[in-house]
Amino acid sequence: MGFFDRENTIAPPGYNRWLFPPAALAVHLSIGQAYAFSVFKLPLTKVIGVTASAPGDWTQPSLAWIFSLAIFFLGASAAVFGRWVERVGPRKTMFAAALCFGGGFIISAFGVWWHQLWIIYLGYGVLGGCGLGLGYISPVSTLVKWFPDRPGMATGMAIMGFGGGAFIGSNLSLLLMDRFKSATSTGVGESFVAMGAIYFCFMVFGSLIARVPADDWKPAGYQPATQPGKLITIANVAVDQASRTRQFWFLWVVLCFNVTAGIGILEQASPMIQEMFPGKVTVAAAGGFVALLSLFNMAGRFVWSSLSDYTGRKAIYVIYLLFGAALYCLIPFAGYSGSVIFFVSVCVIILSMYGGGFATIPAYLKDLFGVMQVGAIHGRLLTAWSVAGILGPVLVNYIRQYLKDQGASGVALYAPTMYLMSGLLVIGLICNLLVRPVDERFHFHGDKPRA
């Protein structure tokens, strides 16, 4: 395993830093499949009935926990293993992520074939979720170190892949299910096996080409700042100190509520557009909607985070949260108007800013806490994603089910939840406005600590 050790991945002099982003993208384009999980939801409600739900088939609320568990363990594993990731480097972490993520699919296939939902919870939710967490944070701190001159753009490049992975994942899922379906199978189990093998290979490729810069490396012509900016420190804060600051918890709330709102749409995207526009949107078109959301999610991660290098992180989050709150209120209006185009337009803008929020947060942390342990700090902050991964789908699915039991249908199934999400974004906006520079008493003094 010496090949995977961090000291064996240090780039030689003259190494082109632009060779690292493909490694990050190989991993993030793979694990981004999680955002396309909604295309499996309806087929998984028909595992017994095949063409229609039968007695004993799983319900949508019970299936929503697969995605929620995956996101919960994404954040939990990122927080628990954040220091380990900093210590061992991206290559070993990416390889571990490949084992977990690919293995999660294989285990879940048996859950489908044996019709045991707890096995899917364990496979895709727990093991796959750990693969998500390790794969998500593994390239982030390395990219910040390769691109200290453009940290927003750098993290946007990698995290863009997570958003774009849903575009690949949704189309691949539909293609494989269509290929494997039969009179006795929806094709989900077989698709899980194929996807586990495919994603494992791509993630291993990313791990093999990963490199880290030498400690004294810097880009040609780059001069590090010698004086702190308004919200950009030249000092460093250790991860244990960072989690004791108000700034950390303000950003935790910002990320949690921004993700809660966006993930509620993503997790339920395919069923939601079909129910809000009955008879107008086919299953295939709903799959295309999921893919379109992922494209804007992907593009927003790169465009908005790159823009933040010029506007500053705090200002860009004001846009995400304020404009986003207004757009969530427009979703029910779009549904009642009957305009699919209007609805889709609102959703894709929301998802672009949702993705931008994810991609900008590592650079925001770097600005506030320095680069020394930004990967570990980012890992701890992702516990906000864990909470949001449960909160968002639970709110959307269980409020929808309650309203359906009360006789509601169509847009009425989702309107109250969209207004609730808007309110959460307003709370996030207030927290963002309260962010100030980190007090000097939290700054690290002395030699760089062991991660």
Image (spheres, rainbow, N blue to C red):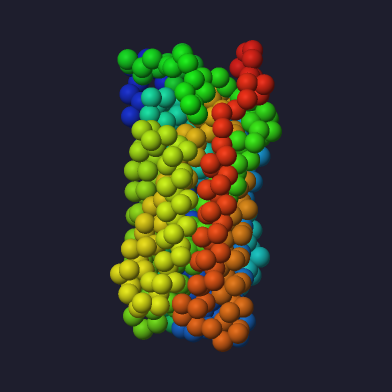
Give residue 275's position: percent from left, percent from top. 44, 78
Is 412 drawn above or below residue 119 in the view shown?
below
Horizontally, residue 159 falls left or right of residue 340, namely: right
Is 380 drawn above or below residue 74 in the view shown?
above
Q: How many marks?
A: 0
Instruction: Please tell me which residue is depicted at 50% across the width and 66% down the height of the picture.
Output: 418
Is residue 74 in view? no
Viewer-side residue, 244 vs 382: 244
Give residue 242's position: percent from left, percent from top. 64, 31
Give residue 47's position: percent from left, percent from top. 53, 77
Instruction: Please tell me which residue is depicted at 60% across the width and 85% down the height of the picture.
Output: 406
Is 209 drawn above or below residue 335 in the view shown?
above
Give residue 56's position: percent from left, percent from top. 62, 82
Instruction: Please tell me which residue is depicted at 42% across the width and 34% down the height of the picture.
Output: 312
Give the quarter of the figure containing the N terminus.
Answer: top right
Residue 405, picture quadrant: bottom right
Give the quarter of the figure containing the C terminus.
Answer: top right
Instruction: Please tell me which residue is depicted at 34% across the width and 43% down the height of the picture.
Output: 303
Is residue 445 in view? yes
Horizontally, residue 286 falls left or right of residue 369, namely: left
Residue 119, picture quadrant: bottom right
Name of the residue lying farthest toward the left: 341
Horizontally, residue 79 falls left or right of residue 34, namely: right
